[in-house]
Image (tube, rainbow, N blue to C red):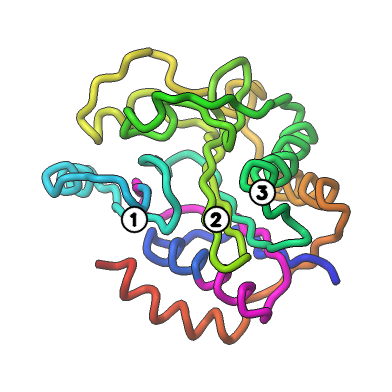
Amino acid sequence: MPFRLLKYKIFDAASNMALDEAILESHRKGFTQPTLRFYGWAPPAVSIGYSQKMDDETISKIKSRGFDVVRRLTGGRAVLHFNELTYSFVASPPVLSEQLNEAYRQICQGLILGLKHLGVEAELGKSNKQYKDFSDCFMATTQADLQVNNKKMVGSAQLRRQGAVLQHGSILLDQPQDLLQELLDTKQETKIRHTNFNEVKGEAVSIEEMENAFTKGFAEAFSTKFEEGKLHEFEEELLGQLLLQYSK
């Protein structure tokens, strides 16, 4: 059976996180096949890790600048969803390994192949013990991330729930180097925080072209085909319930 593709759409922060969780639960219950989704954020937002601490003053400051704030169901540090493309992938064994690091590698291989189709060579990052010292996801690289020229371009996080796996992440396209640091009111230790896809590519690429390239990359990585789909009725029903949770 082909994997499901949910094509790029733009939602608010609460809807994006509710959708990812609804897709995870639907797959866990056996209602839907492995699913690849692409999405954007309006208004732009900062998502914070499930266990990450952030004080009310900082959250208020971020919102006063016109950015939304939402807590992810995955771990990790804060991610700025502005001038970027977000992906999510949901699957379970035997499609994905039961080993955490290997599952990250499998999914990241789809991203690496997708970037290659776009003319950009990326590689897996390495573990950085200082990662938890930062409040900003892109200030350090882990084995779940992709880097180009030793600078992070794609940051990802994963959640496992009774065998089902959700991995989602941010692909930076043209994001200011210091914007998230300003929003978090933290001192940036380096002027070059990350690598933007547009800078490496030398031009901007349409979202449609990127979506097609990454879908092709995932199809190759998992030796499968993707078929454009829509939300299952279970996902639509659960989405309404989860929106209340993520809108708090």
The N terminus, quarter of image: bottom right
Label 3 environment density (alpha carbons within 10 Å; few <14, some 14–19, many ≥20): few
Query: What segment carries the magenta color?
Result: 22-48
**Which numbered disc flags the more N-terminal residue, 3 or 2?**
2
**Foreground residue among 132 and 72:** 132
Query: Callout 2, which amino acid?
Result: Tyr
Name the front one of labels 3 and 2: 3
Instruction: Measure the alpha-carbon separation of dots 1 and 3.
Output: 26 Å
Give the quadrant of residue 232: bottom right
Left or right position of 52 against 230: left
Left or right? Give the position of 28 relative to 15.
right
Which disc, if any, is residue 39?
2
Residue pictured at 56% horizontal, 29% vertical = 153
Distance of mark 2 from mark 1, alpha carbons? 17 Å
Crowding near pointer 1: few (<14 within 10 Å), some, many (20+)? many
Residue under label 1 = 71
Q: Is residue 248 above or below residue 74?
A: below
As helix, strand or loop, the secondary structure at mark 2 comes to strand
Residue identified by numbered label 3: 99
Amino acid bearing label 1: Arg
